[in-house]
Structures are given as structure tokens and as C-alpha cells.
Image: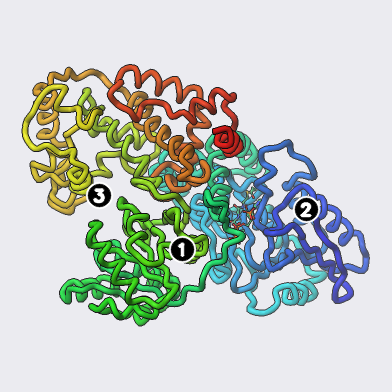
Amino acid sequence: MAEYNRVSECVGLITLRNPPVNALSAAVRQGIVDTVERALSDPNVKSVVICGQNGIFCGGADIKEFGSKMTGPPLIPMIHAIESANKPVVAAIEGSALGGGLELALGCHYRIAHSKARLGLPEVSLGLLPAAGGSQRLPRLIGVPAALNLITTGRHVTAAEALQLGIVDQVTDHNTVDAAVKFALSVAGRSLDPRRISTHPCPQQPDLDALFEEVMQKVRQSARGAIAPIACVQAVRAAATLPYAQGMERERELMATLFTSGQARALQYCFFAERAVGRWRMPSGARWDTSKPRPVHKAAVIGLGTMGRGITVALAQTGLSVIAVETQEKQLMEAKQAISGMLERGAKRRGVAPALDRVIYSQNIQAVADVDLVIEAVFEDIALKTKVFQQLSAVCKPGTLLCTNTSALDVDQLASETPNPELVVGMHFFAPAHVMKLLEVVYGPRSSPQAVATAMQLGKKMGKASVAVGNCRGFVGNRMLKPYIEEAFFLLEEGATPELVDQALEEFGFSMGVFRMSDLSGLDVGWRVRKGDGLVEPGTASGRSARIRQGRRYSPLGDLLCEEGRFGQKTGRGWYQYDKPGSRVARSDPWLHSFLGAYRAQHGLVARRIDHQEVLERCLYALINEGFHILDDGIAAGPEDIDVIYVSGYGWPRHRGGPMFYANMVGLAKVLERLEHYQQLHPEVPHLQPSSLLRRLVASGSPPIHKWGEVIKKLHSQL
Ligand code: 3H9
């Protein structure tokens, strides 16, 4: 809805009312049409101000309406009527003006923003383009290069930047609506012709073709198969080269293709999934809205290796005081230097003062006595972690939350070593912890809802996509990664190369294929875990039996590379070769290819031709299958949780929505059929055995993803 009032005698004030973000739903659009008409036809009204209720101008088109038939007045003629008005219309921008919200403001003759407001055209991140004239008006207002940057990245700008770019006319620290009303009074009666952006020519730009070519190349490279960024460039090109009416026609055509695309569906699903995971729930029935977090003002990090340093920076940047503990003096000094550098660089990027004095360094664990929360980030060794937890239990004040950053160890086991297991949760960060968006908050059967709520809230404050998951080996992300990596190894045995597997996965949209990723994170990490599991057998045993361990197919390829000292980038050799240790440019390695040939010969394996389709099906369906097991086990509360984990932390292409959304798009029956097919060919591979949940979902007619929860609940209640 939109509410109408007359203020200061001759200003018509239109207030958008659609909490929480005043999205342009059918009712709001109708309200704007009606109230604008009313203001324009009232002879006492000399000018008009449009604002939004509750400190937010407008979050854009109502994304929830996208799936259903369009009703109500369309946006484009509505904005056009505002721009054509013969009385000045001023947008009073507080909070956010995003997407259709900014397009509405661009249709107004003037824009006044509060200094804390954010503006942007983020449609690209929803698989769309600004199709209510935004792609045509913005370049006319601020020039092609700046418009291209905003529209192709979707980034939000501050009011100060918006003023500098020329998007807004004035910025105020005071009441925005009052400032806009005052401004509207001051411009009443002035000619509006120069204020109608659609009538402006696009500012001249030398070497237009070269600019578009360069931007298109950059966008194609970073888009990894996403179509919206490319359509955004094409739309801005239309603005720069065509008259406005023809540019609008091009904008409409491009939007028509995007609007119904699977990518737009996937990206909009991600938008809602990221918000849904904040409404966490535990199998015990505890939930986000009934569990109150404890306040956290002071935190501690124990162990200042790579993870501990990143976590310290993330906490300090959130505004917390942090006690950073490392027992060895030399390591402590090195960590202090590294953390200070990270804080300084981060502050420079964000244009703020570095939070150096928020971190206190200590060699003594006693220093954490009065903190509200501790994150332990020592070496992945259960005996060491147990010792640290016992020390923390003795030192910390009552009620301090004890968190472990383990990526593999049993959170319940650690909890059981403390007198207060309800205060223990896992906080699984991803390296580098101050950069990576994902945080898995791992609860055990004894973790209190308050402990989970506190860790989730802290994650949110740190700007992380925080997902609450149950405790199991590998939690959600790494548990699903295991079959994915194993399938990649098996494909090498059967005739593929690291290049072929990586290319298939990168063309699918992963930021890095499995082998390039393994080289980056270090082959020795998995080797250590497999050794711990008793899977590694040094030596040169050959034949099929050498590749069956603990009753299932096993590929020792990774172990053999480690025995050669090939740990990946850090040693300059891994699945690829590098110019020098630490270098990042992977090059094909003839040694590896002959090693694979010799390995196959030794084991009596005959290389066959493997295509991209098989790589994708075997790696991705194995991973998805594990996702169904995880849902069935109740480790993840819903498919959204898994998808947010994969999109935010594992390089899964966002425009494919996450593994479970992808399975839904491909069709559950197809995923099941392909798993059954590969299972028949590889009966000794248990992770290709379709999960019973997948079978039951297919048997119940493959319901859409938002209905899986109901099916799982029903199935579990029948058990
Ligand atoms: C568009 O405009 C297309 C046009 O160019 C042309 C068309 C022809 N619609 O994020 P929050 C919900 S495309 C519906 O937690 P914050 C959100 O789901 C649109 N619902 O709050 C959540 O619901 P719930 C382009 C929306 O304060 C609640 O509002 N616009 C919309 O952290 C609170 O959201 C965008 O892409 C919407 N447009 O952040 C902007 N927006 O409580 C998308 C939000 O049930 N929105 N909701 O989970 C945002 O970026 C942030 O929501 C915003 C507020 C910055 C506005």
C-alpha cells in the first residue's frame, strides 16, 4: 500500500507501506499509481515527496511475486508517469533503495538520501537485470563505466558514493523526509525538463566498443556460466547506443529471457535460503525464536595458526575485545605481526581505523578467565583439544561458552570432557576465516539451545552465512565432499586426467575443480586423516584387492603422491606442477600422466574414454546422495541448509542454487536412475547406493524442494 498526506500545505507526501522492506508488491504499485494521480490532480499540491515507512525507502520488486501470475499495475508505466509529472517529485531515501526501489527513485526528479542509506541495482544477484528502466536511466545519469560497474556487480553504494557519482542530489544527517519536503518546496515551479533522466543522452564515452569488449570479457570470466551479468552488459550497451525507447525494448527482451531462466530461479532460491537458515531448529525442538543468545562482549581464541589468526581478525573486526593465546613465544610474536597486518589491510579496504588495540596477546591460558566465549583453534588432535577444553573449564568464569573450530573431530566427545557439556558447540570456520563467508555451528545432543543461539548470533554479526548442523563425521560440508573426491580419484584410475575432471567441474561453474582445490589445500591434509582411519598402506601392492580397503573400493592415488612429497602448491608439485613452491598457476604435469599410466598398468586397469557428463554425474550425484543421507539423519534441518553451506563455502556455483536445489532441477527420478546405473557398474562403492530418502521422495512423486521437509517429517513419524 501507499499512504497519502498533504504536508506543509502544498506538498503531497506518499509513504510506501509494506513491511519489512516496502517491496513493490501489486498493492504497493496500485497505491503509488493512485496517490500520484491524486497529488497531481490536486491544485493545492505544488510538489510531491515519496518515502518509505520504518526508515527504509524500498527493497525493490517483490521477489515473492515472481513465481506467480503478475497482477496490479506494471512498474514501467508507473515510473514513467512519475517522470512525466508536471510537478516536481522528490524521493526521500532512508535505509535502502534497491533494485526497483532505486528505479522508482530514478524516475523521480530529485533524490535526497540519508547519510546512512544504501543504494544499488542488485538484480544481477537474483539472475535478473534492472528492468524497470534502471539499465537505461542509470547510464544516462552517471555515465557508462560507473553504471556498468554497479549493474554488473549489483554492489550497494553508500549515500556519500551515490552523491559523488551523481545518483543523489543531496545527503542529509537529519530527518530525510523533512529535508525532502523542504527541498520539494524550494524547487516547486521550476522547469522539470532537465530532470527527466530518460530524455538525457548517455554521456559521451571515448572508445565505447573497446570498453564494452573489455567489460564483457571480464564479466564472462568471473560469471562462470551465469547469464545475467552478460545480459546486464548488453542492456547498458543498448542505453549507450540506442535512443531511450529502443533501449527500453532491448531491456524488456533481455529480461524476458532471464526472468523464466533456471538460473534466476536458483539465485532467488539462494536469496530466500540464506534467510531461512537463520531460522534454525534442532531435533530437540529448540528453535531460533525461542532461544535467547547470551551477550558476547569479550572473546578468546586459543591457538594462533592459520585458522586462529583469521578467527581473531574476524572477531576484532566485529567490535569484540579478543584475548589471543599461543603458548610458544616465537609463534605468538609471528601471529601478532600477521594479525596486525591483516587488521591494517582490512581497515584500509573499509576506510576505518584498524582495531589493533582490541586484541590482547598472551602466552597464558589463565588470561581468558573473564571472557564470554572461547574459540579453540589448536592443532587437529583429540588429545590436545581435550587437554585445552579441560584447562578452559577450570579457568573460565561460569557460563563461558566453549567452542571448537575442529573440522573433523567429535564435538560430543570434547563436550563430554567438560563439566558443562551444554556450553560446548562447534564453530567450524573456513580458511581464511576472516574472509570466507561460511560458518557451520555444530551442536551435539547436549548443547544447550542458548549456546547454539549465541554462536549463531555471533556468526551473523561477523557477516557469516551461519548454518546450524548436527554433529557427525565431517559435519555437512566435508561429509558430502568425501564421496565427491573419492569419485574423482576413481575416475583417474579408470582413464580420466586431473585436467579433464577439473575442466568438467569448472565448466559446470565451480570456482576450482577437485584437483586444483586439493593442490591448494594440501594433499597431506587428507592423507593424515586417512592414516588416522587406518586406510593408508605403504608399499606397492597391486591388483583389485589392493584397492579394496575396509570392505570398499579405495584409491591410494592421493597417498602415493604424498609418499613422493607431492603435497600440492606448497611443495610446487601435486596433481599439477607449479613454477615454484607456493606458486598458484597450475600447469599440466607429464610426470603425473606417466605415473597414472604406470599405476593403471600395475593394477591391471584399462583406461577408457570418460566424458564430462560422466564426471559430473559421478562426482555430483555421489555428493548429492550423501546430502540425502544427511537430511534423513537429521544432521541438516532442510535442503536450504545444505545448499547455503555449499554455495557459501565450497565454491558451488550460486546460479545453480546448491546441490539439493540442483537435484530438484535435474529431477529426482533422473538422479536416482543414474545412481542406480553407476551402482550396478561399481557395486563396491557404497556411496553410489541411492539413499533411502531419495528413493522415498521419488516414490512419493518427487515433490518440489520446498515440500521435502513435509515428506521427511511424515516418513520419520511413520518409523
Ligand atoms: C527487482 O527489483 C526487479 C526490478 O528491477 C524490475 C522488475 C520488472 N521482495 O534481508 P533481510 C524479505 S528485483 C520480497 O533479512 P535486512 C526477506 O526475504 C529486487 N521480500 O533484511 C526477509 O523476509 P523474512 C531487487 C523481500 O534488513 C525480510 O524481507 N532487490 C525483499 O538484512 C527481511 O530481509 C533486491 O535484490 C524483496 N525485494 O536487509 C533487494 N527484500 O523475514 C533484496 C527483502 O521472511 N533485499 N525481503 O526472511 C535485500 O538486499 C535486503 O533484504 C535489504 C534488507 C538490504 C533490503
Q: What element carries label 2?
A: helix
Is the CB of mark 3 within 8 Å of ligand 1?
A: no
- The residue drawn where x is 13% and y is 34% is 592
Would you identify the image quadrant in which residue 599 lies? top left
Marks 2 and 3 in Cβ contact (< 8 Å): no
Image side of residue 547 versus residue 709, left or right:
left
In front of the other: 670 or 384: 384
Q: Residue under circle 2?
A: 28
Q: How many other residues sit within 10 Å of disc 3, few (<14), some (14-19) or many (≥20)?
A: some
Instruction: Measure how far apart labels 1 and 3 are at the Cα level.
Output: 26 Å
Q: What element carries label 1?
A: helix
The earlier-in-sequence mark between 1 and 2 is 2
Q: Which mark is residue 455?
A: 1
Image side of residue 432 versus residue 191, left or right:
left
- The residue drawn where x is 45% and y is 57% is 446
Callout in the foreground (1, 3): 1
